[in-house]
Image: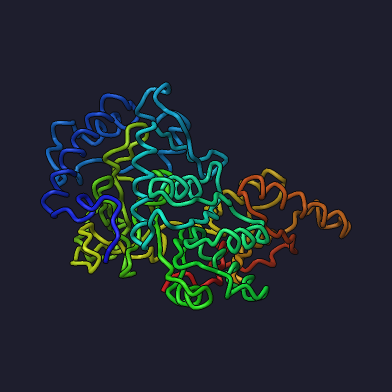
C-alpha cells in the first residue's frame, strides 16, 4: 500500500492541481512585480504586465530566468522579501567566482521540508525508520533538505554529512539505519566498503534516496543488488529550493514533480518554444509558493521528458524522466557543479594559457577530474620541481573555486589537439545517461 505524507495533495485531481497552480501563479507574479525590480524590468522589456497573466496557459508570455540572471543580480537582486523576513541562505557554485545564493523565509523552509518528507514516505519511510543523511550539510542543499524532511516524517535522523566512511558504517550498523540518503556514487562506494569489511549481514537498509548527480539504470541495479535495497532518484536545484522538486515512488518509472509548488515545462533549448508533454526538451521550472526567492520560468539546462499517466502509487503529479543530458557545458563531478569557465578563470589568473582540456572519468565508484594545460614560454625552461609546484598551486586554487580536488598537469605547448582550430575542452569518459 502506498505511503503518503500529504495524501489529499499528492493524489489530487488534475483539475484541483491546475486550480492551485492558477491561483498561486497569479499570486506569485503579483508578489514578484511588487517586490522585485530586476524581474519586473524583464517583464516590461518583454512587453508583459501582471494583468496579461490570467492562468497557467499564459505562462509562455513571461521571460525566462537563467543562471546569467542569477549572476548579474547577485547577491540580493532577485530576492523578493525583506531581509528581515529571511532566515537562511543556501548556495551552490556559479559559472564565475560569484555563487548562486538562494534565500528562504521560515515558511519557504517548511514547504521545502514537506517536499522532502513526501520523497521519504514515497519510498516507504515512516516514523519507525532511521534515516542516514550523507549528503553535504552547510551551504549545500542536500543535507539540510533531507534532514528536514526526515524530521517532518518523524524518523530518527542521522545527520552524518559526507565523507568519513568508517564512521558512516559504524553508525549504519550500530543504529540500524534503514534509509540512506546520498549521491549515487557515494552509495556505490559505501556498498563496496560494506562488502570489503564483511558487514553485509549487519546492514538493515531497505531503501536509498540518491540524487545530485546523473546515474544510469545499470548503476541503480548494481547498488540495489549490493546493498539489498530499492534505490530511488530525487531531483532539485538550489535555485528552486533544493532536493524534493521531484522524487521517485515505488514504481521507479520517473520522478513526480511537486506540482502544488512548481510548474514545469519542456522547451526547445534553441528557440525557447514550449513543447507538448512527452517531448524531449529543456526543463523549465516556476516556483509558485516561495516568498523570498521565487524563480519564474527558470531554465535548468537539464534535458528531460514529462509524462502525465496513471501511476500505480496513486499520485497524480506529472512525472519527469531522469535528466538525459545538458543543454550547456556544465559537468557534475562528485555532486558538485563544474563549469569549464570556472577552470579557465583560475588558469588565466595564475598566468597560464586558455589552451586546456578537462578529463573526467569514473574509476570504480569515484569521479576523477584532471586538467591539462599547455605551458607558457616562461615555464618552458623551468625545472621539473618548479612545474610541479605550479601544478600544486593551480590544484589548490581549483579546489578553492570548485570545492573538489582536481589533478593538474602542465603539458608541452600545442600538445592539446585542436579540432578545426578549436580545442575540445571536455572529455567525459563516464557513462552517465542511458
> Along the horizontal axis of the image, is 340 left or right of 314?
right
**Residue placed most toward the observer, 283 or 357:** 283
Q: Where is residue 292 in the image (x, y as percent from the top left)?
A: 36, 31
Question: In terms of depth relative to the viewer, which is nearer, 80 or 159?
Answer: 159
- The residue sitting at 74% across, 57% down in the picture is 375
Vertical side of 428 occupied by 27: above or below: above
Q: Position of residue 428 (x, y in %)?
A: 55, 68
Q: Would you identify the image quadrant in which residue 233 lies?
A: bottom left
| Vertical order, 232 against 289 (above or below) | below
Asked whether 103 or 109 is in front, the reply is 109
Q: Position of residue 205 (x, y in %)?
A: 49, 67
Quarter occupied by the N terminus: bottom left
Residue at 45% over, 77% down: 221
If the image is split into quadrants, where does the C terminus sit? bottom left
The colour scheme used to paint the residues is rainbow
Is 146 left or right of 393, judged from the image as shown?
left
Instruction: Say above or below: 41 vs 145.
Output: above
Q: Residue 391 at x, y = what percent?
A: 76, 55
Looking at the rendered structure, the number of numbered marks drawn on it comes to: 0
Give residue 98's quadrant in the image.
Answer: top right
Say whether residue 229 is left or right of residue 54. right
Amino acid at each position: 500500500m502506498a505511503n503518503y505524507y500529504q495524501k489529499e495533495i499528492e493524489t489530487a485531481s488534475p483539475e484541483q492541481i491546475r486550480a492551485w497552480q492558477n491561483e498561486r501563479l497569479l499570486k506569485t507574479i503579483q508578489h514578484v512585480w511588487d517586490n522585485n525590480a530586476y524581474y519586473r524590468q524583464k517583464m516590461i522589456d518583454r512587453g508583459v504586465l501582471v494583468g496579461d497573466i490570467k492562468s497557467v496557459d499564459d505562462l509562455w508570455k513571461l521571460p525566462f530566468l537563467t543562471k546569467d540572471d542569477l549572476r548579474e543580480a547577485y547577491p540580493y537582486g532577485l530576492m523578493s522579501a525583506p531581509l528581515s523576513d529571511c532566515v537562511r541562505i543556501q548556495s551552490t557554485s556559479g559559472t564565475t567566482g560569484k555563487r548562486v545564493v538562494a534565500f528562504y523565509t521560515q515558511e519557504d523552509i517548511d514547504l521545502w521540508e514537506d517536499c522532502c518528507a513526501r520523497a521519504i514516505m514515497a519510498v516507504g519511510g515512516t516514523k519507525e525508520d532511521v534515516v542516514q543523511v550523507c549528503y553535504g550539510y552547510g551551504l549545500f542543499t542536500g543535507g539540510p533538505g533531507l534532514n528536514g524532511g526526515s524530521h517532518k516524517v518523524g524518523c530518527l535522523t542521522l545527520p552524518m554529512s559526507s565523507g568519513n566512511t568508517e564512521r558512516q558504517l559504524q553508525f549504519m550498523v550500530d543504529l540500524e539505519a534503514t534509509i540512506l540518503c546520498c549521491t549515487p556514487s557515494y552509495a556505490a562506494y559505501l556498498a563496496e566498503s560494506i562488502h570489503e569489511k564483511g558487514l553485509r549481514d549487519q546492514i538493515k537498509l531497505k531503501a536509498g534516496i540518491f540524487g545530485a548527480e546523473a546515474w544510469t539504470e545499470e548503476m541503480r541495479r548494481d547498488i540495489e543488488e549490493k546493498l539489498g535495497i530499492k534505490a530511488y532518484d530525487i531531483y532539485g536545484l538550489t535555485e528552486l529550493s533544493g532536493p524534493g522538486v521531484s522524487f521517485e515512488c515505488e514504481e521507479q518509472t520517473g520522478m513526480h514533480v511537486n506540482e502544488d509548488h512548481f510548474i514545469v515545462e519542456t522547451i526547445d533549448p534553441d528557440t525557447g518554444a514550449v513543447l507538448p508533454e512527452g517531448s524531449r526538451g529543456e526543463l523549465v521550472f516556476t516556483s509558485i509558493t516561495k516568498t523570498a526567492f521565487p524563480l519564474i520560468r527558470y531554465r535548468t539546462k537539464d534535458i528531460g521528458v514529462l509524462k502525465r499517466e496513471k501511476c500505480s502509487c496513486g499520485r497524480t503529479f506529472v512525472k519527469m524522466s531522469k535528466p538525459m543530458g545538458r543543454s550547456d557545458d556544465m559537468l557534475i563531478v562528485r555532486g558538485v557543479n563544474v563549469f569549464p569557465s570556472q577552470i579557465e578563470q583560475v588558469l588565466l589568473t595564475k598566468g597560464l594559457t586558455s589552451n586546456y582540456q578537462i578529463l573526467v572519468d569514473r574509476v570504480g565508484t569515484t569521479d576523477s577530474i584532471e586538467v591539462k594545460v599547455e605551458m607558457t614560454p616562461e615555464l618552458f625552461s623551468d625545472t621539473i620541481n618548479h612545474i610541479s609546484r605550479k601544478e600544486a598551486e593551480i590544484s589548490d586554487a581549483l579546489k578553492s573555486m570548485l570545492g573538489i580536488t582536481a589533478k593538474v598537469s602542465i603539458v608541452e605547448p600545442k600538445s592539446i589537439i585542436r579540432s578545426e582550430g578549436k580545442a575540445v575542452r571536455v572529455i567525459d569518459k563516464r557513462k552517465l545517461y542511458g
